């Protein structure tokens, strides 16, 4: 475990050098907007979500606005994100829950966040890291794929990957680490192909070492 923690720390440093700025790829201004954008991102690209939320957040400005919204209007706006009926219902329901159960304020624990309609651990961790600046591990597809290739985790199950990463990542760097993995996964270590020749992490990557060994 000690060696794995050192490896994780080295990878964090390398990613920090490669991507000095760590930013969420979802566009938002208010905490509830990140929550809603996170819900919309299920089985949808962040780029499309950002297009849709531009109109959505201009029309509905607050948690209370969403709690009182006409579900058919929400469905109309978010339709391009897919699963729009389910997502519209969960957006309105989660905002009503926040108004009724949490006094209009987004809760600040994973346990409470995951009580909200449509909010799983991935979005809950996103909120914990970006809104409340607490240690968080967002296990999206990039995180799971890349951490598996690097040899940091031995599972593809999001909950297990989260647990394993929490054990080895520096807590204060965990949220930004996940943001950097999104950029890294889009540009270098893609789902289609790992571009090992241009990879700043190749010295730490188990998959890359196997490829070199075969060569």
Image (cartoon, rainbow, N blue to C red):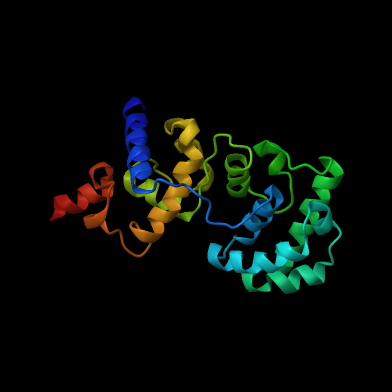
Quadrant location of the C terminus? bottom left
Looking at this rendering, what residue extends furthest in the top direction?
Answer: 2
What percent of the width, then of the height, locates residue 69? 84, 63
Q: Is residue 151 left or right of residue 99?
A: left
Q: Is residue 178 left or right of residue 32?
A: left
Residue 104 sits in which quadrant?
Answer: top right
Camera-side residue of 11 and 141: 11
Looking at this rendering, what residue extends furthest in the left direction?
Answer: 215
Asked if residue 156 shows in the view, the reply is: no
Residue 8 sits in which quadrant?
Answer: top left
Write the residue at 36% across / 27% down.
1
What percent of the width, then of the height, locates residue 184? 38, 54
Looking at the image, is 51 positioned above or below residue 20? below
Asked if residue 205 shows in the view, the reply is: yes
Write the residue at 57% across / 40% down.
129
Write the residue at 50% across / 50% down.
23
What percent of the width, then of the height, locates residue 211? 20, 53
How many marks the image carries: the answer is: 0
What percent of the width, then of the height, locates residue 127? 62, 44
Write the residue at 42% across / 50% down.
181
Looking at the image, is 15 positioned above or below residue 184? above
């Amino acid at each position: 475990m000690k060696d794995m923690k050192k490896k994780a720390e080295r990878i964090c440093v390398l990613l920090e050098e490669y991507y000095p700025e760590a930013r969420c790829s979802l566009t938002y201004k208010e905490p509830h907007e990140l929550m809603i954008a996170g819900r919309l991102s299920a089985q949808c690209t962040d780029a499309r979500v950002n297009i849709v939320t531009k109109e959505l957040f201009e029309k509905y400005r607050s948690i209370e606005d969403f709690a009182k919204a006409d579900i058919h209007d929400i469905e109309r706006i978010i339709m391009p994100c897919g699963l729009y009926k389910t997502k519209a219902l969960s957006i309105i329901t989660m905002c009503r829950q926040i108004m009724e159960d949490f006094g209009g304020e987004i809760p600040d624990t994973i346990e409470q966040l995951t009580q909200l309609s449509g909010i799983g651990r991935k979005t809950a961790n996103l909120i914990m890291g970006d809104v409340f600046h607490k240690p968080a591990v967002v296990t999206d597809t990039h995180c799971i794929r890349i951490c598996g290739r690097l040899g940091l985790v031995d599972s593809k199950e999001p909950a297990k990957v989260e647990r394993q990463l929490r054990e080895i990542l520096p807590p204060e760097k965990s949220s930004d680490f996940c943001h950097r993995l999104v950029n890294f996964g889009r540009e270098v270590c893609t789902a289609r192909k790992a571009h090992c020749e241009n990879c700043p992490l190749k010295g730490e990557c188990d998959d890359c070492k196997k490829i070199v060994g075969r060569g």
